[in-house]
Image (tube, rainbow, N blue to C red):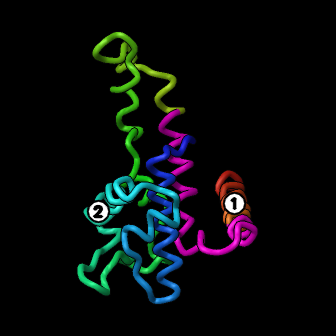
């Protein structure tokens, strides 16, 4: 799976807000942009998208700024990626047609089930990870993700055994 820069930057902005949440703080657009090395315009576009989608909320005024709209423990990565994704799997057959207006394999395609299946696997894995789990040291986050991965492998083995 390829994560676009748009998705990566959006996730990074959300992680900053999740860190601020643990301290009961909000962050201004300038603070988010500076902490992530983004232009204010780029961070602003991402925050606008995520505000519109209900992931973040903004408060105007001297003590204003951005906060998560829900606790970080309730925001799953599949939701974030779905909101920020510019190239959904639904568009696969429409955007990868070659020189024609429509794909020549619309009635019987061996590629589509692979692409859709891989997308479902990735979405399932992302649905197990919350924004709160991305806050902390890289080693702690990596350990948490390995636990999730092992659990998914065990669950997959149990499903195929029955």
Residue 92, image x, y percentages: 40, 31
Q: Residues within 10 Å of mark 1 (few under 14, many from 20)?
A: some
Quadrant where the N terminus is found in the figure: top right
Marks 1 and 2, how far apart at CA: 28 Å
Residue 146, image x, y percentages: 73, 63
Q: Which mark is drawn over residue 53?
A: 2
Residue visible at 67% across and 51% down? 160
154 vs 23, left or right, is right
Residue visible at 34% across and 55% down? 41
What residue did someone put label 1 on? 149
> Magenta stretch: dominant SS?
helix
Compared to 157, does 148 lie above or below?
Answer: below
Decide which of 57, 73 is in the foreground and name it.
57
Q: Residues within 10 Å of mark 2 (few under 14, many from 20)?
A: some
Compared to 45, does 64 lie above or below?
Answer: below
Quadrant where the C terminus is found in the figure: bottom right
31 vs 51, left or right, is right
Which structural element holds mark 2? loop
Highlighted range, magenta = 115-144
Which structural element holds mark 1? helix
Q: Is residue 90 visible?
A: yes
């Amino acid at each position: 799976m390829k994560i676009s820069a748009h998705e990566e930057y959006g996730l990074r902005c959300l992680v900053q807000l999740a860190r601020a949440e643990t301290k009961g703080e909000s962050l201004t657009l300038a603070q988010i942009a500076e902490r992530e090395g983004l232009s204010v315009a780029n961070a602003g576009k991402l925050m606008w998208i995520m505000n519109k989608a209900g992931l973040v909320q903004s408060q105007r005024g001297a003590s204003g700024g951005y906060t998560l709209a829900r606790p970080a423990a309730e925001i799953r990565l599949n939701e974030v990626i779905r909101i920020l994704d510019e190239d959904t799997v639904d568009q696969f057959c429409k955007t990868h047609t070659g020189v024609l207006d429509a794909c020549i394999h619309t009635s019987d395609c061996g590629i589509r089930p692979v692409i859709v299946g891989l997308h479902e696997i990735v979405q399932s894995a992302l649905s197990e990870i919350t924004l709160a789990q991305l806050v902390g040291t890289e080693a702690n986050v990596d350990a948490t993700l390995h636990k999730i991965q092992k659990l998914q492998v065990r669950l997959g083995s149990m499903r195929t055994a029955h």
